[in-house]
């Protein structure tokens, strides 16, 4: 098996608060794995359970097929990059980075070699003697990374490591972290509440709500085939349309006032049909506005009620039918793009293959 | 400036004068050549300081005081470290109550503490010696140690300890390599304050010394000999200067302890 980390039905509560409720996860060796979810959903707690700073009330955690029951944090094959970096303020860069080497039986020369290698890896060459208090936020983050990576852990745990950085630096560090992970081949588990960060960096993402894991998938699957409305609206934007559906052998038939007659194959539907109710989801960018004078057959007609300009894209609110909720539609502002105005009536076309259905 | 703050300033100023002016008389008369403590001054001399060098009972008392001050400040600081460590990191029932009791000597009249300790020691059948004074002084210094160490430990970010554990250190190594260096200024402040408090303390020492007197008790005894008054003043001057230096040092360390916020974001 190459399930390096196995979390088996783990629960953890703090007094009244159930922070983690029966979570099970399997994380492959050498992958970049993210825990994504809104504030307070238990991401940090789950990470700390893996690191050994918290002890589960029930359930089991295995790393490399060894049970972590009763194993202290200092004896686990994990290292952590803390949210506030936790750089030792009384030590310089080199002393911070070599902190964990004391217990290893290494000669001075070997240690020096490892230190300079890891400093080069994180781009801090030459800063060995810099005092911890003289470091910028980005440099502290690199020291924290170096300090953990030098010990060659099986799993590197990162708790929102980028949230304290400004936007530019954060985007740069996202790329660097991803490259670093590929270069060293260590399994990374990253906690973040930033969906974009999770999507761009990870091989796999677990989406958590309220102490539970709702979906574990690749970023693409997560975005294109969200397993629930919550996941769909947490990751990006989605239009939800209430409709009635009829079950057939390999999918669902929907007669929609807005979308017309459509068929949604089984693999695009989650949940079980009851009362014929279905919620159809479609991403704003999967709807496009067709120029006014085109052939109108099979197209939906709607009126623009709002326009927001975002530089690369423009968001439109479009009302289709008088009593339906306005649809969000986004369009790339590319060369030759038509200019629309509020109040204009337009024709819409949508990619039926991208529809997802949510049943109760 | 408002009226009330003007009055406040005036009040504070007079308060300080009344508090410290008498202490300033000490150095003045200790350099005065007359044996009688009165104005006008008669002349300048180092004579009284020189006589200090030749009094063996004084040296004995000084040695006793140093033993007591060092022992009780070290003892109180160690206990203070343990108490505030548990108070800042762990939650347990009776935490507030026990803290209140430990801090009580701050507000209890020393004479009551002294008498109470004396009775207890006598009842236990223990003899009075320097160690009974050490005990009393430790009790007295503890509140200061705890308050200083509490603020030092409160400034210690728990994620630093976790990071150390995460990097493979055990509890002991973490204490030695991370906690101790970071609370070191607090420890110095506590030691210095404790030392100064003990060195100057009279009432408890008076009740609890047997035959080995400490410096303040020795000074008190000297007042029976009017001729020795200027010498005593010289001794007092030295004590005053020492206390001032020690307290300034301890304040310096205390501030460093507060300023060295360990979370360095
Ligand atoms: N030591 C603790 N004592 C009591 N409650 C705690 C403790 N740690 C976490 N909790 C609670 O457990 C829940 C989950 O917390 P956790 O820190 O894991 O959330 P999170 O997903 O990391 O949130 P954020 O994105 O805000 O960091 C929260 O309700 C929190 O208040
Ligand atoms: Mg968190």
Image (cartoon, coloured by chain):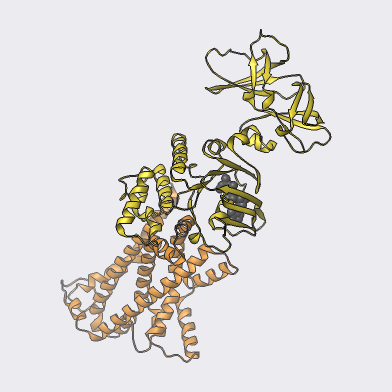
Where B248 sits versus A260, above or below? below
Percent across and percent down for residue A9 are 66, 54
Q: Decide if residue A274 is on the left or right side of residue B16.
A: right
Percent across and percent down for residue A237 are 63, 30
Where B105 sits versus A213, above or below? below
Q: The yellow chain is which one?
A: A
Q: Can residue A92 be seen in this view?
A: no
Residue at image location 56% in from the left, 68% down from the top: B95
Percent across and percent down for residue A148 are 44, 52
Where A193 sits versus A87, above or below? above
Q: Can residue B214 be seen in this view?
A: yes
Residue at image location 26% in from the left, 72% down from the top: B237
Chain B is shown in which shade? orange
Looking at the picture, tell me which residue is in the foreground, A175 or A308: A175
Q: Quadrant of the N terminus of chain B?
A: top left
- Looking at the image, the residue that sits furthest to the front is A1
């Amino acid at each position: 098996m190459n399930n390096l980390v196995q979390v088996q039905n783990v629960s953890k509560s703090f007094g009244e608060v159930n922070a983690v409720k029966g979570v099970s996860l399997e994380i492959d060796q050498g992958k970049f794995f993210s825990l994504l979810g809104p504030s307070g959903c238990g991401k940090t707690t789950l990470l700390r359970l893996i690191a050994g700073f918290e002890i589960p009330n029930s359930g089991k955690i295995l790393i490399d097929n060894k049970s972590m029951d009763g194993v202290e944090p200092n004896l686990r094959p994990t290292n952590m990059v803390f949210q506030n970096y936790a750089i030792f303020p009384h030590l310089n860069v080199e002393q911070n980075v070599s902190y964990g080497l004391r217990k290893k039986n290494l000669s001075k020369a070997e240690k020096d070699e490892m230190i300079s290698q890891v400093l080069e890896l994180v781009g801090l060459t030459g800063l060995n003697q810099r005092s911890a208090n003289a470091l910028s936020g980005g440099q502290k983050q690199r020291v924290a990374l170096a300090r953990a990576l030098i010990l060659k852990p099986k799993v590197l745990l990162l708790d929102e490591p980028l949230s304290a950085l400004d936007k530019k630096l954060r985007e740069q560090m996202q790329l660097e972290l991803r490259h670093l992970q590929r270069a060293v081949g260590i399994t990374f588990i990253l906690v973040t509440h930033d969906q974009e960060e999770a999507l761009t960096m990870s091989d796999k993402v677990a989406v958590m709500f309220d102490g539970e894991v709702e979906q574990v998938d690749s970023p693409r699957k997560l975005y294109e085939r969200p397993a629930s409305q919550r996941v769909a609206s947490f990751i990006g934007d989605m239009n939800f349309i209430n409709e009635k559906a009829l079950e057939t052998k390999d999918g669902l038939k929907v007669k929609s006032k807005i979308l017309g007659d459509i068929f949604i194959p089984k693999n695009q539907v989650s949940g079980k049909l009851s009362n014929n109710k279905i919620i159809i989801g479609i991403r704003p960018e999967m709807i496009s506005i067709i120029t006014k004078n085109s052939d109108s057959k099979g197209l939906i007609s709607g009126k623009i009620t709002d326009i927001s300009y975002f530089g690369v894209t423009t968001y439109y609110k479009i009302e289709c039918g008088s009593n339906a909720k306005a649809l969000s539609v986004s369009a790339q502002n590319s060369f030759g793009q038509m200019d629309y105005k509020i109040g204009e009536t337009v024709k819409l076309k949508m990619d039926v293959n991208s529809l997802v259905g949510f049943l109760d | 400036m408002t009226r009330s703050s003007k009055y406040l300033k005036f009040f504070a100023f007079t308060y300080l004068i009344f508090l410290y002016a008498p202490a300033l008389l000490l150095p003045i008369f200790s350099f005065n050549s007359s044996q009688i403590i009165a104005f006008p001054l008669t002349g300048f001399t180092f004579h009284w300081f020189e006589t200090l060098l030749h009094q063996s009972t004084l040296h004995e008392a000084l040695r006793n005081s140093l033993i007591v001050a060092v022992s009780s400040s070290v003892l109180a600081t160690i206990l203070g470290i343990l108490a505030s460590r548990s108070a800042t990191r762990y939650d347990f029932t009776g935490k507030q109550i026990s803290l209140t009791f430990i801090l009580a000597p701050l507000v209890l009249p020393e004479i009551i503490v002294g008498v109470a300790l004396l009775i207890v020691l006598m009842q236990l059948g223990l003899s009075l010696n320097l160690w009974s004074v050490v005990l009393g002084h430790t009790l007295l210094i503890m509140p200061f140690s705890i308050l200083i160490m509490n603020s030092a430990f409160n400034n210690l970010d728990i994620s630093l300890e976790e990071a150390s554990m995460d990097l493979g250190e055990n509890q002991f190594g973490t204490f030695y390599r991370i906690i101790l260096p970071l609370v070191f200024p607090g420890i110095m402040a506590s030691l210095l304050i404790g030392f100064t408090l003990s060195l100057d303390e009279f009432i408890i020492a008076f009740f609890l010394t047997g035959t080995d007197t400490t410096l303040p008790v020795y000074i008190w005894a000297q007042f029976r000999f009017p001729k020795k008054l200027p010498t005593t003043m010289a001794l007092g001057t030295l004590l005053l200067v020492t206390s001032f230096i020690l307290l300034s040092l301890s304040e310096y360390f205390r501030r460093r302890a507060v300023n060295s916020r360990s979370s360095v974001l």
